[in-house]
Image (tube, helix red, strand yellow):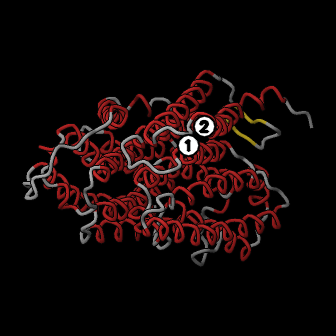
Amino acid sequence: MSIDYALLFRVLLPEALLTATALLVIGVDLVWGSGRSRGSRLQMAVGAGLLGVGVAALVIWQDGAQGSVWAGNLRVDLLAVAVRLGVLGLTGLSLLGLTGSRVSDQPAEYVALALLATVGFLQMAVAQNLLLAFLALELASLSLYVLAGYDRSRPESAEAALKYFLQGGVSAALLLFGFSLLYGMTGRIDLTGISMALAAHADGSLSAVAVGMVLAAFGFKAAVAPFHPWAPDVYQGAPPMSAALIASAAKLAGLAFFWRIFWSGLGPLAATAPLTGGAGGGWVPVLAAMCAVSLLLGNLVALAQVSIRRLLAYSAIGHAGALGLGLLSAGEVGPGPLFYYAATYGLATVGAFACLALLDRAGDGDRIEDLAGLRRRSPLLAACLAVFVLSLAGIPPLAGFFGKFVVFAAAFRIDGLSHPAGWVALLAIAMSAVALYYYLILLKQAWIAEDVRVRGPIEVPPAAALGVVLAAGLLIVLGAFPSLLLGRF
């Protein structure tokens, strides 16, 4: 087996750059951060992190290499390039938003962990091998566990990290056990070889158990019901920009990861494995049922929330159902609609959490009523928050509307209502009307309700302002010109 090491180095160069940047951030803080204020240390760490992210994105953008690398263990294709650039963009916006957060005692370590999580995200986008995919997933997950509990001044942060870690550990165990069963059945760990072996012969009972475990792991990583209980506590307890990274970049990379697992590896079991009993079962109707439950539970429970972050968490569970619908249809129509939805959802989520970080920095609480008077205290935040919320609600001409439109249209294009995806799409359209109600409650508080406490203006650091404006601007531009992303596919 001959390996083109020059090509392998080119493919892995972005990961190497981010790893070197993470080490550089910590080293610079140790040498020059001593005696400086926490604010200046944060600016220095974020600046170095953004430089590393920018250089890595430039390398990916300019590198035209595509195809299988390292004997097929890595695959660089259009989806991989798009996801890697999208992940780096969301990470960069998260770092900009960090400048508007309450400064922790270890800003350099925070930025380094965020960069290491991004290394895992980048590898998840190209891994074509079960072992490499699992290692990339765990590198990202372990970093996110620490980031979720990074605010040691709040017990809620430690609780969020513990719940995230425990449920994530169970999910990792299920995924690894499912992978081991697939290896036992096929004798292969590369997705192409697994697909060929399963197409030739698959043990029914073992296939059902293996695919069921992979589905459970997907449910946890994407916060799809009934594997969602960690999401509300983590979104509420974790530092705002940690929650933003979990809800945006991690979700985008995870969807690309599981798209490869399901369609490149488990495609032959989509409609043959006896997961639902009888012929024509497979994992497709099971995933469709999970998506339907997520849409119902996420959007209906969100109506009862008084915490902004818990509302966004249940909203994310509802969006996970719609993203799962995109995953269902991606096997037939390609990953373009799924990527567009996931990327634009990530932009809106990062922007919303950046606004919440600034409110938290100003000493405000997490209740919906705390948004009262935002239009007077910070017109910029109020305007950007309106863009983020309306995009999440799917209001045209913002990018969130076209994300939902292309995913729902792709679901109907498969076989109409004769396919499970068609019925889930109908439910998703109905739940979008429900979601509009609780999203408008946020805007009502921010733009109409009066601030009875008469609080002062909110100070928005220039870097944080740049982050929220950039995220809002991208949602407007991608909504007006969706072909900028969709046309690539």
**Vertical order, 242 against 19 (above or below):** below
**Crowding near pointer 1: few (<14 within 10 Å), some, many (20+)?**
many
Residue linked to disc 1: 108
**Vertical order, 85 against 276 (above or below):** above
**Vertical order, 375 against 437 (above or below):** above
Which amino acid type is shown beneath numbered disc 2?
Val
Residue linked to disc 2: 25
Dot 1 falls on a residue whose secondary structure is helix
**Vertical order, 290 against 402 (above or below):** below
Res 484 quadrant in image: top left
The answer to whether mark 1 and mark 2 are in CB contact below 8 A is: yes
Instruction: Please report the residue visible at 52 percent of the width from the left and 71 percent of the height from the top.
Output: 163
Residue 74 visible in this rendered orientation of the protein: yes
Instruction: Please report the residue visible at 60 percent of the width from the left and 54 percent of the height from the top.
Output: 143
Q: Position of residue 76 (x, y in %)?
A: 67, 35
Residue most extreme to the front: 35
Q: Quadrant of the N terminus?
A: top right
**Crowding near pointer 2: few (<14 within 10 Å), some, many (20+)?**
many
Q: Position of residue 401 (x, y in %)?
A: 30, 44
Q: Give the camera-side residue of 126 and 142.
A: 142
Instruction: Please report the residue visible at 57 percent of the width from the left and 24 percent of the height from the top.
Output: 58
Q: Give the camera-side residue of 343 and 241.
A: 241
Q: Give the camera-side residue of 107 and 479.
A: 107
Sooner in the amino-acid sequence: mark 1 or mark 2: 2
Res 425 quadrant in image: bottom left
Which amino acid type is shown beneath numbered disc 1?
Ala
Q: Position of residue 321 (x, y in %)?
A: 42, 61
Residue 290 visible in this rendered orientation of the protein: no
